[in-house]
Image: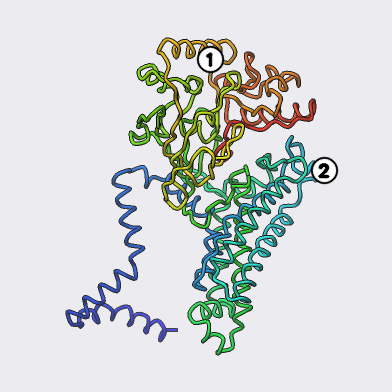
């Protein structure tokens, strides 16, 4: 043992001496090599220092723990993709696989009394069994990927792109099972959420969630598998030189399959964690997780939005800078940046004497959000899609595109704007009109709203979509929900499709009240109401 330590000490101690003994050219090469080999660490260090100087709160305890928590949530998927990268490949089906397994876990672990329970006759399954199910599903997806890569020598990008689409289709079909009708899965059992995001310990009053511990355990496990097992050595051998590995006796076919199976199992683990962490799973859960180091979302004006009490675990971007609030005019058209407030159109219409957008002026929010939600005034018989000419967007790979209205597939309260699209601006169709006529329409709409909707009260707007041929407020009233109250949240006495914050309502109060209404309406009328308010973030 002492001899080993002596060798180690000599090796470490001699490095500086060896460097000093080098010629000038060799020293420059050594420094250059060290900089290149450690470039990523250097860039990260510079970024941390720069941000810490600009925003001192970045290095405060709550921020540090938030970064650790966000990293831990995505670490299992990174560990899985890491194996594919060692094989000089990739796996772009990872995010969709996480989404599928998260939805499966959420559907099997909904609380028994939840009004929108996907499997009403199924009790809450044991956590260990659900965990094994989702890991097996993930491993099965990995098996498919690995088989086609190994058997047919196809590039992993091509194979996993195909698998990504298949898995996404599977998620869509799965969410249509029973009476779920594609709705978001929430109402999770407390045992599940506590197991995943319960408090592991607190540091300075800031809670560290339990899944941080699970991420640490998984990292240690994967390190052992990669570095201390025959499989791990074979994986690195195949990644370095597949032909040489084959000649040396490595079963290349089996090794490639096992790498992808292990990756799929890690996606299943991520899905299990993510299902409880976000507490609200949909077909878009897991989208682009294979690319994301940190979660991010873009919001409009926030007028039709409910942010859960646990906040948003990532970056929230609001398009409110001057560049997103520009307005330009064409022949009978007006192009508005996504951050332009709908109410701002009122003055512009009167100044420029063009009509057609009066209904939009009375809708709280901004142009981008109105376009994404295809909002409108039911009583005015107008929707945003009636006056849109085209929208300018930036897609998930950073390409700016102009999309004509015909490609947006607009329908009542929905539109074809994928989650990785960000609306930059919208061009509306207008028509010449007199200021008097425009002002008259604006005044009529304001008077109608003040009479028939809660005005100057705390509300996130119309809560539920109107079912085809029906009115949500009438169904709510018929089901005996008028005046219903949960905590500080109450059904408006003026309009039943508005939920009011009476002063101290939490997001949980609002959401619980909404889910209670959905249950009562379904029991009374067999109609299942759908949320119109966008719900974002995680429960506290």
- Expressed as whole percent of the image width and height from the top left, the position of residue 292 reads 48, 54
Which circle marks residue 121 in the picture? 2
Return the x and y of residue 323 as percentages of the image width and height.
34, 36
Which of label 1 and label 2 is nearer to you? 1
Furthest toward the left, the residue is 24
Which numbered disc, 1 or 2, marks the residue that appears first in the sequence?
A: 2
* Residue shown at the point (70%, 29%) measured from the top left: 468
Residue 445 appears left or right of 267: left
Q: Which mark is residue 455?
A: 1
Q: Residue at x 49, y 72 (%)?
A: 88
Q: What residue do we see at 56% from left, 80% from top?
A: 234
Residue 232: x percent and y percent? 56, 76
Residue 404 sits above or below residue 439 on the image: below
On the image, the x and y values in percent for residue 414 come to 59, 35
- Farthest residue in the right direction? 121
User: What's the residue at 29%, 79% (across, down)?
Assistant: 13
Q: Secondary structure at mark 1?
A: loop
Q: Residues within 10 Å of mark 1 (few under 14, many from 20)?
A: few
In the image, which disc is placed on residue 392? none
Q: Nearer the viewer, residue 390 or 87?
A: 390
């Amino acid at each position: 043992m002492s001899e080993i330590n002596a060798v180690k000490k000599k090796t470490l101690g001699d490095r500086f001496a060896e460097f000093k003994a080098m010629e000038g050219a060799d020293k420059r090469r050594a420094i250059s090599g060290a900089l290149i080999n450690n470039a990523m660490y250097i860039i990260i260090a510079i970024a941390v220092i720069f941000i810490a100087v600009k925003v001192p709160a970045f290095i405060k305890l709550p921020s540090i723990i938030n970064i650790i928590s966000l990293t831990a949530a995505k670490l299992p998927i990174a560990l899985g993709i890491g194996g594919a990268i060692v094989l000089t490949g990739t796996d772009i089906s990872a995010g969709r696989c996480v989404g599928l397994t998260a939805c499966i876990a959420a559907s099997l672990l909904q609380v028994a009394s939840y009004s929108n329970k996907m499997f009403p006759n199924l009790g809450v399954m044991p956590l260990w069994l659900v965990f094994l199910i989702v890991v097996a599903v993930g491993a099965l997806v990995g098996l498919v990927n690995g088989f086609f890569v190994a058997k047919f020598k196809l590039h992993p990008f091509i194979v996993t792109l195909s698998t990504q689409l298949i898995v996404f289709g599977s998620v869509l079909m799965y969410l249509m099972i029973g009476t779920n009708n594609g709705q978001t899965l929430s109402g999770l059992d407390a045992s599940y959420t506590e197991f995943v995001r319960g408090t592991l310990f607190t540091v300075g009053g800031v809670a560290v969630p339990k899944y941080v511990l699970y991420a640490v355990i998984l990292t240690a496990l994967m390190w052992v598998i990669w570095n201390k097992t025959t499989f791990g050595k074979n994986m690195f051998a195949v990644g370095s030189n597949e032909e040489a590995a084959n000649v040396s006796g490595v079963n290349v076919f089996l090794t490639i399959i096992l790498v992808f199976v292990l990756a799929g199992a890690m996606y299943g683990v991520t899905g299990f964690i993510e299902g409880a962490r976000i507490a609200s799973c949909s077909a878009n859960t897991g989208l682009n997780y294979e690319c994301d180091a940190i979660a991010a979302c873009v919001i409009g004006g926030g007028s039709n939005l409910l942010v859960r009490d646990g906040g948003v675990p990532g970056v929230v971007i609001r398009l409110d800078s001057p560049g997103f609030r520009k307005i330009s005019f064409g022949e009978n058209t007006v192009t508005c940046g996504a951050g332009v407030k709908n109410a701002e159109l009122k003055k512009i219409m009167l100044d420029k004497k063009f009509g057609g957008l009066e209904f939009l002026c009375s809708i709280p929010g901004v142009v981008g959000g109105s376009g994404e939600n295809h909002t409108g005034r039911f009583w005015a018989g107008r929707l945003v899609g009636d006056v849109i000419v085209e929208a300018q967007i930036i897609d998930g790979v950073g390409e700016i595109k102009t999309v004509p209205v015909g490609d947006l597939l607009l329908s009542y309260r929905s539109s074809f704007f994928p989650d990785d699209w960000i609306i930059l601006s919208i061009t509306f169709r207008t028509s010449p009109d007199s200021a008097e006529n425009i002002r008259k329409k604006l005044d009529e709409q304001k008077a109608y709203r003040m009479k028939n909707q809660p005005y100057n009260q705390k509300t996130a707007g119309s809560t539920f979509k109107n079912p085809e041929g029906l009115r949500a407020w009438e169904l709510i009233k018929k089901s005996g929900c008028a005046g219903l109250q949960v905590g500080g949240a109450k059904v408006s006495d003026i309009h039943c499709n508005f939920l009011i914050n009476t002063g101290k309502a939490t997001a949980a109060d609002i959401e619980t009240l909404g889910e209670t209404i959905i249950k009562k309406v379904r029991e009374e009328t067999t109609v299942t109401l759908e949320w119109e308010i966008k719900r974002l973030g995680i429960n506290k």
